[in-house]
């Protein structure tokens, strides 16, 4: 921004005619006059579009300081496009001037803003003293709070004992590895080769070479698994005995919006920025912006609290290209983001405990366990939530690693837990999370009406109960790889397998019977394939195993007239005799309560393309 300040005996103007960019005005706004005034002629430049909030704030402070120095009694803000050849878009110019008018007015000054985008005639009487004419260039530099002190770590035991990490020798291998990396800053080398990516490729999950680095693509099998996990995340949050509002939103937001710009500072150079026609946008890095933008317009009463808002939100973070990992660390992720809106801290702690319990349940369902890295924004936040945390640590009967951020920064949150598993490479990997947010309600203007009729800012919980969709898939694949390392046949839960049952005809004479059996099983909402190709039985059986089909059945002469089937059970890695009804009952028992979708590819293998 470029400015020219004139300390004047008076300044008056009259609007003549609009330009194509003119803002609407009333009859009263067509003229203006102020005496004993500091007139600030203002030109908003293109470079200000990336930091409009900072420019408005710093320019306002400079104008008010100058007015005090010269003894002006009033301030006039006058848009003036002639101080720079490189103008911002009109929307940014209007927004910056409106923001400045609000800041100056809220600071107690009598201020008048001349209309933007109009041709105007003006008269001014400059006082002529040495400080009466000044020029400025405002660059809108970031001003960050200076942290006081350094980050700290302690280990909290279930009996309430606090220990220095370097003195603690207990806990699981996962805990020790997590503590070594986070608190002791020791890089823990991975052990062996990365194996889970073989399963990603098996199910058609890969990097997209025609996109930016870190972006994934899903072939039909992977796409089906992705959607099933997304459906599962919806089922999880809607089973919490909590009213949940599912929403759907956009994936980009304007950095001209104050709350967006403030929150964006936390992510620094990990933001994706999109250049628009008139203003710039940031690709959202969580579901927060969309849900909060909606909530600020909702009419919320204490009677409706607590409630949840949920979206499986595509989110974007510009991770280092050398650090991206299929499913685990990506530049585009899909976050099943649940926000629980609570009346106060007490209620938020109650739901924090409930979400913590459900997060552990979801891991246990897959045969996994978590270790906790608990982040606190300050020591005061620890004292505030210590009783809650101790109850969680005691319930799980395990230590927690506590991380304290440097003091002196006004974080929007107080406490969050990152839940880590130990993967096949013996690395601690974060999957789920839950956080208490005490700042964004005020930042976005989200309020509820309490019993007395007052408008109150709620406390908001953030939670990804199962992690991102991609990280949940990562945990599924990593679990299967661990089974293989233990000498077992790798398996996935039946509900998430793209093909749950496959019938394989010995010859064309058996194909009709294979389809009859497939129809009966498919009617029970089971995903069924039919290998109708002119291949040997041996090859068909091998490929069914390679495709990780849960149950594979050869249909030959015996099956033409019999209900009894010889079923290859992948989980047991052996053939089992059962009837068609027993097969259906077994599969249904394994997928009970879990989401179902039909296959995303033809039932007949002869009609499938080779991915």
Image (cartoon, rainbow, N blue to C red):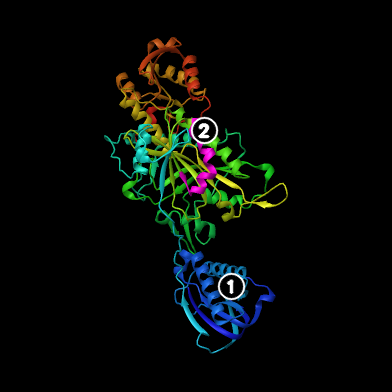
Q: Main secondary structure of the magenta part?
A: helix
Residue interval drawn in magenta: 375-395
Q: Nearer the viewer, mark 2 or mark 1?
A: 2
Per the image, is 385 magenta? yes
Measuring 54% from the left and 90% from the top, which residue is drawn there? 128
Image coords of residue 215 (percent x, y)? 38, 46
Above or below for 499 versus 322: above
- Residue holding disc 1: 22
- Residue holding disc 2: 357
Taking the view exactly as shown, the residue that stands out farthest to the right is 452
Residue 5 is labelled as none
Marks 2 and 1, how far apart at CA: 56 Å
- 600 and 315: which is toward the camera: 315
- 392 and 560: which is toward the camera: 392
Q: Is residue 362 left or right of residue 209?
A: right
SS label for mark 2? helix
SS label for mark 1? loop
Compare marks 2 and 1 and give the one earlier in the sequence.
1
Per the image, is 484 magenta? no
């Amino acid at each position: 921004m470029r400015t020219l300040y004139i300390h004047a005996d008076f300044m008056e103007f009259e609007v003549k005619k609009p330009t194509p960019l003119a803002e609407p005005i009333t009859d009263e706004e067509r003229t203006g006059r102020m005496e004993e005034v500091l007139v600030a002629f203002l030109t908003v430049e293109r470079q200000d579009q990336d930091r409009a909030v900072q420019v408005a704030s710093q320019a306002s402070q400079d104008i008010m300081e100058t007015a005090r120095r010269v003894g002006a009694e009033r301030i006039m803000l006058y848009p003036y496009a002639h101080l720079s050849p490189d103008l911002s878009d009109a929307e940014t110019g209007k927004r910056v001037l409106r923001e400045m008018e609000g800041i100056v007015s809220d600071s107690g000054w009598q201020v008048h803003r001349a209309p933007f985008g109009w041709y105007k005639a003006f008269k001014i009487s400059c006082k002529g003293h040495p400080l009466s004419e000044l020029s400025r260039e405002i660059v809108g530099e970031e001003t960050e709070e200076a942290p006081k002190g350094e980050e700290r770590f302690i280990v909290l035991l279930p009996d309430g004992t606090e220990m220095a990490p370097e003195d603690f020798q207990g806990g699981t291998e996962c805990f020790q590895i997590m503590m070594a990396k986070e608190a002791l800053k020791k890089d823990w080398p991975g052990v062996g080769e990365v194996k889970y990516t073989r399963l990603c490729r098996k199910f058609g999950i890969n990097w997209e070479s025609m996109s930016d680095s870190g972006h994934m693509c899903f072939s039909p099998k992977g796409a089906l698994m992705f959607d099933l996990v997304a459906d599962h995340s919806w089922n999880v949050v809607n089973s919490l005995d909590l009213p949940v509002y599912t929403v759907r939103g956009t994936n980009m937001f304007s950095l001209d919006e104050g709350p967006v710009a403030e929150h964006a500072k936390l992510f620094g150079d990990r933001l994706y920025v999109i250049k628009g026609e008139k203003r710039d946008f940031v690709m959202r890095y969580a579901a927060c912006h969309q849900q909060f933008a909606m909530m600020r317009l909702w009419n919320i009463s204490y009677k409706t609290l607590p409630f949840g808002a949920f979206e499986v939100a595509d989110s974007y973070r510009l991770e280092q290209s050398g650090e991206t990992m299929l499913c685990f660390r990506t530049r585009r992720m899909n976050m099943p983001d649940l926000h629980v809106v609570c009346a106060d801290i007490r209620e938020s702690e109650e739901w924090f405990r409930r979400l913590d319990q459900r997060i552990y349940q979801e891991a246990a369902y897959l045969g996994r366990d978590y270790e906790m890295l608990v982040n606190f924004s300050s020591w005061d936040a620890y004292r505030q939530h210590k009783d809650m945390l101790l109850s969680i640590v005691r319930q799980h009967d395990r230590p927690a690693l506590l991380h304290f951020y440097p003091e002196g920064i006004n974080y929007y949150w107080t406490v969050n837990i990152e839940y880590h598993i130990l993967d096949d490479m013996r690395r601690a990997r974060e999957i789920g999370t839950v956080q208490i947010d005490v700042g964004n309600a005020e930042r976005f203007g989200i309020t509820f009406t309490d019993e007395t009729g007052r408008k109150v800012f709620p406390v908001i919980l953030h939670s990804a109960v199962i992690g991102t969709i991609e990280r949940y898939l990562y945990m599924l694949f990593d679990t299967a790889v661990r089974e293989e390392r233990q000498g077992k046949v790798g398996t996935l839960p039946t509900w998430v397998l793209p093909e749950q049952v496959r019938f394989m005809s010995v010859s064309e004479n058996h194909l009709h019977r294979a389809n009859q059996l497939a129809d009966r099983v498919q009617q029970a909402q089971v995903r069924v394939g039919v290998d109708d190709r002119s291949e040997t039985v041996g090859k068909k059986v091998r490929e069914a195993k390679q495709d990780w089909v849960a149950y594979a059945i050869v249909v030959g002469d015996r099956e033409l007239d019999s209900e009894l089937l010889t079923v290859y059970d992948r989980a047991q890695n052996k053939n089992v005799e059962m009837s068609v009804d027993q097969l259906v009952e077994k599969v249904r028992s394994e997928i009970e309560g879990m989401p179902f979708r039909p296959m995303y590819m033809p039932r007949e293998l002869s009609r499938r393309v080779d991915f």
